[in-house]
Structures are given as C-alpha cells and as structure tokens.
Amino acid sequence: MSVASVRRAAKESVSGLPRAFWWLWASTLVNRLGAFVSIFLAMFLTADQGHSASFAGFVGALLGLGSVVSSIGAGVMTDRLGRRPTLLIAQASTAVSVAVLGFMTDPVAISVVAFVVGMASNASRPAVQAMMADIVAPEDRVRAFALNYWAINLGFAISSVAAGFVAEYSYLIGFIGEAAMTMLCAVLVFLKLPESRPDAAAGASAGGAKGGEPDVSMGTVLRDGRFMAVVGLSFLLAVVFLQSQVALPVAMADGGFSTKDFGMAIAVNGVLIVAVQIPVTRFIEHRDQRLLMVLAALLGGYGFGLTAFAGSLAVYMLTVCVWTLAEIINSPIQMSLVARLSPVHGRGRYQGMYTLSWATASLVAPVAGGTVIDRFGADALWAGCAVVGTVTAAGYWLLMGRVPAATGAAAATTAPTEGAAPGAGTGAAPGAASGAAPEEPGARPSAADPAGSPA
C-alpha cells in the first residue's frame, strides 16, 4: 500500500464528523490518559497501605457496585438535565472523589470513597454516548464510535505505562494526576461542548405530546422487548470478555506462567485495538451488521474457548488476538445499534440501561469465573465461554432479523448550536456540514449501547 493510499484512508476515516464530536473525542482521550485508580488501586491498597488482598477485592467490588447504581440515575439525568450538565457533574465529582481517595487510610473511609468514585466515574458514560448519537449522523455512527473506542484504548495503553513509573515514585501523585486530568475534561466540556439534547419544544410544532414523541420513562425502557434483548445479549458477551480480568491471570498462574507473562499476553489486546481498530472499522462499516454481530459473538466465545488448549505464551497471545478482534467488531456496531434503537428523547435512559449491562457483568464475571475454576477447573470455564458465545451469536441472529436496516432517509432532531434559541432544534451541531443528522425511519423506544464498554 502506497503512502498516498494510507493518507487517503486516514483522511476518509476522520473526515465529515462534526467539530463537537472531536471535542468530545478529545475529552475521552484526556480522561483515559489520566487513568490510574483502575490500574493500580489493588497494589496501592496492599503494597502501600498494608491492607489484605481480600480487602482490595472488596474495594474493587464497591467500585463496580457504584457503577451499577449510577448507570440508571445518570441515564435519567442525561435526559432530564441534559448531556452537558451530566458530564460536568460526573467529571467534577470524579476528580474530587479520586483526589480524596488518595488521602484515605481508614478502611471504612476507603470503602465509602471508592463507592463514590465508582458512581461518579461511570455517570459520564450515558451522557457521552447519548451526545455522540445526537451530533453524529446515523451513517457515520459506526465510524464515530470506533474512533471513540480507539481513543479509550490508546489513552489507557499510554496511561498504563505512565502509571507504572508514577507508582514507583508516589501513589498519591497518581491519584492527584488522575483528578487533574479528569477536571481538565470537565473544563473542555464546559468551554467547547454545547448542549446536544434535542429540544422537546422544537418537536412540538410537529405535533404530539411534548415534542412529537411520547414521554420516555424507565418503564418504557423495561417494556421495550427488543431493546432489553440487546441488553441481555450484551451482558452475556460482556461476561465472556471480562474473564480476561480475573480468570485469565488465575489460569495462567496455575499453569506456571508469571505476572510478566500475563502482562505481555494482555498487552496484545490494547496494542491490537490501537493498531487495527480504524482499518477494520473501515472494512466492516457498510457490511451486513447481522453477520458481523454473530461473527463477533463467536470469535469472543471461541477465542476464550481456545484458551483451554494454550500451553505456551505464544498460544495465549494468539487467543487474545482472536477475542480482541471480536471486541473490535462488536463495540462500534453495538454502540451504533443502541443509538439507532433509542428514541430521540430517551437516549439517556436507554444508554444508561445499556451501561448497566456492562456494569453488572463486571460484578458477575469475576465471581462466576472464579467459582467455575475452583469447582470444575479452568478448562470447564473456557468451554463455557464457547457455549455462551454460541448462544449469544444465535441471539443476535434472531434479534438483528427484527431490527430495521440503518438508513439516513428520515428527518431527525439534532443538537442546537451554541447560542441557539430554545426551540430552535433544527440547527446543526457545530462543525456539521448541514442541518440535522437524519434518524432512521421507524425509530421507537428501543436501543442499546459498551461503554462501555467495558470502558
């Protein structure tokens, strides 16, 4: 491939997206560059503070529990208060709570603050995902979500290395550094991102109650069978992916591999995402999403299933390549699917419910993986991952047959520009080429999106 071809491909990957998206993207990258707590919290509690490994595990569980609790609340805030206020509150709260956690020594105080950190750090996800759906045209969403996912992994890869050096000098500097970077994100949001929540008053002229769409409540979300099926399938696949956090290192240790070996194996995940996420997304962007979601579920399940046959570091690294490819395919398409199925005025709640699927999986996966390994052995766990991947693939095959194909034909509500008068919901987002991003026809209360992934 020539240099000109590479330049043209790179330009096509980033062109046509609104300016507001790039400020949102930048805030995501800055946030992940400052990641520290999620990487070295356990080591901070045990090696620096002298607490037991079981207490470190308990604190980690409290972080996850905080994420579960905040998923729904943050989704409701995103719809009621708006995307921008929710982001500001979440990021400012995260910055303050992370800084405070670095000074805590009492076990009770550590536990309480860790729970708050979990709540605050997860609260921004529904707002980020809803804002992205607001400002990016449907035909560009797979690419936009892929670029955001790429930023998350690039930032995390860099921060992981930097955090290692910082931790050798001072854990407290790491906490303060993450707080400062997160506060910088809040400043970026405040200065550069306009509110993107569709104005209910703008839709009123089209007829209907409060903007032409029925009110969306959490009951609406729960009654949306198609959307809840997406959430359920997302949960199953997330449980498989998250075996990399506890079950995989435990299995490698039982097999005689060192922590350095595990670090090298799991590093393949981040390196591969940074290296091929964008070109793979370009390749799959306009292909059959039904087949791609099925393929991703199978690659995820059988990628972990192949771990049963790993007897060397090279084979472990190969299995990581397989399920990482599943992540690369699944993440942007799944996020785009969530945005496509969400009603315009209920995106926050729908994104919150989707975020909940990953937050819940982060609690279930370590317990389930550890229990299966203790009772039946690691091979049984890897076989179970293959079974879950197969079931999830079948679920996506059935579900995607009921989801209308993505199209940009219908009219849509989009984000007003900065300074637009209330009710002027037809203005383009800053940097948009023209007018509103079109919505798919037939969009109704129904949708899902990883943050988070795991993110």
Image (spheres, rainbow, N blue to C red):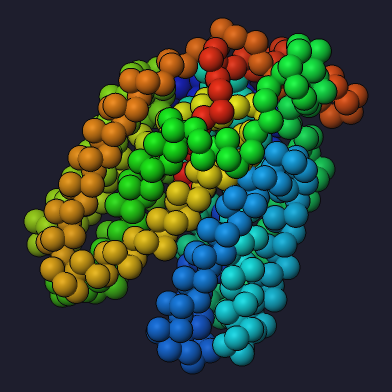
Quadrant into which the N terminus falls: top left
**Of residues 413 and 248, which is closer to you in this image?**
413
Task: Give the percent coordinates (x, y) of residue 408.
Answer: 55, 12
Give the residue at x 55% y 73%: 166
Q: Is residue 246 left or right of residue 71?
A: left
Q: Quadrant of residue 346 in the image?
A: top right
Q: Is residue 381 above or below residue 206?
A: below
Give me the residue at 26% from left, 70% from top.
370
Q: What is the quadrant of residue 215 in the picture?
A: top right
**Which residue is depicted at the point 70% across and 16% down?**
436
Q: Is residue 292 above or below residue 148?
A: above
Query: Which residue lies most toward the top here?
Result: 409
Q: From this viewpoint, is residue 303 visible?
A: no
Could you tell whether 356 is left or right of 266 in the image?
Answer: right
Q: How many marks?
A: 0
Residue 235: give x, y in percent of width and height: 38, 48
Q: Is residue 59 visible?
A: yes
Horizontal side, residue 291 vs residue 284: left or right: left
21 or 220: nearer the viewer: 220
Q: Relative to the observer, which residue lies in front, 435 or 214?
A: 214
Residue 46 drawn above or below residue 199 = below
Q: Nearer the viewer, residue 177 or 341?
A: 341
Q: Residue at point 50% right, 83% down?
A: 45
Percent coordinates x, y for residue 183 in the rendering: 73, 58
Please say if 409 is above or below 421.
Answer: above
Pinpoint residue 72: horizontal percent, then vertical percent.
59, 50
